[in-house]
Image: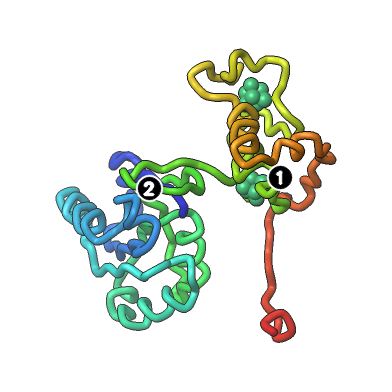
Amino acid sequence: MIITEQKLFAQIIDSLKDFNKIFLVGCGECATTCKTGGEPEVVKLKGLLEGQGKTIVGMCIPGAPCLAAQVKTEFAKNMKALREAEAILVLACGLGVQSVKDNDRLEHPVIPALNTMFGAVMDAAGNFYEKCSLCGECVLDITGGICPITLCPKGLLNGPCGGMDKGKCEVDKDKDCVWALIYKELDKKNKLEKMKEIQKPKDYKKSGKPHKLIITEESKT
Ligand code: SF4
Ligand code: SF4
């Protein structure tokens, strides 16, 4: 999931300084889980903006605003309010903001209310941890399911750097070196021979941006 944090209210107000009538868009997926763009946060921000003299002409919370179909469906239901709006404030990640922009046929100014931080997993206690950098060439099968690209500050692929000290990372001594963790994991699974497989330098062309994946009729079959 994509982790977001709410921008400072003063920043939001500043970005809305040229607009009075605002339409709010939340996110029913990641931003709801992060408690940055679900219904309680949208309603709270509405109250705060009204307290600053803004008129909230309407709001919606698509299940996932990064999906065009969901934005289009919600916008069709809210067309009257959207015609009144001078700008749309989006409580979603950067994907959601851009999807709203791309699918708003009235072409409003679209303003982000959140900062997009990273992709993460959530543990049972509700904490978020970045675990994947979307490198396009996954090596988890040879690293015991632990990602060195993301968890090693140097992104090393063939064992630890010379700075590892008693299993701790030289960049942050409070953290375990990811290669110590990988070693332990492979040892536990009797797969230590994988440590001897030399990984070629990564093809970072695969993580060049922007990515796209076009779905054709052939690729569906
Ligand atoms: S190697 Fe790491 S960064 Fe690359 S796809 Fe796998 S988990 Fe993601
Ligand atoms: S000590 Fe380990 S985790 Fe830290 S930079 Fe070196 S190899 Fe990476």
Vertical order, 63 against 16 (above or below): below
Q: Nearer the viewer, residue 34 or 102?
A: 34
Residue 66 visible, this angle:
yes
Q: Is residue 43 left or right of residue 148?
A: left
Cβ of mark 2 under 8 A from ligand 1? no
Q: Is residue 193 left or right of residue 10?
A: right
Q: Which residue is mark 1?
A: 142
Residue at 76%, 52% (x, y): give it: 206
Label 2: few (<14), some (14–19) or many (≥20) C-alpha neighbours in 10 Å: some
Residue at 41%, 43% (x, y): give it: 128
Helix, strand or loop at label 2? It is helix
Instruction: Name the amino acid, label 1.
Output: Ile
Vertical order, 114 against 148 (above or below): below
Label 1: few (<14), some (14–19) or many (≥20) C-alpha neighbours in 10 Å: some
Q: Which residue is mark 2?
A: 15
Q: Earlier in the sequence, mark 2 or mark 1?
A: 2
Indicate which label's residue lies in the foreground, 2 or 1.
1
Residue 133 visible, this angle:
no
Q: Quadrant of residue 61?
A: bottom left
- Viewport quadrant of the C terminus: bottom right
Helix, strand or loop at label 1? It is loop
Q: Is residue 209 left or right of residue 199?
A: left
Residue at 34%, 47% (x, y): give it: 124
Q: Quadrant of residue 71?
A: bottom left
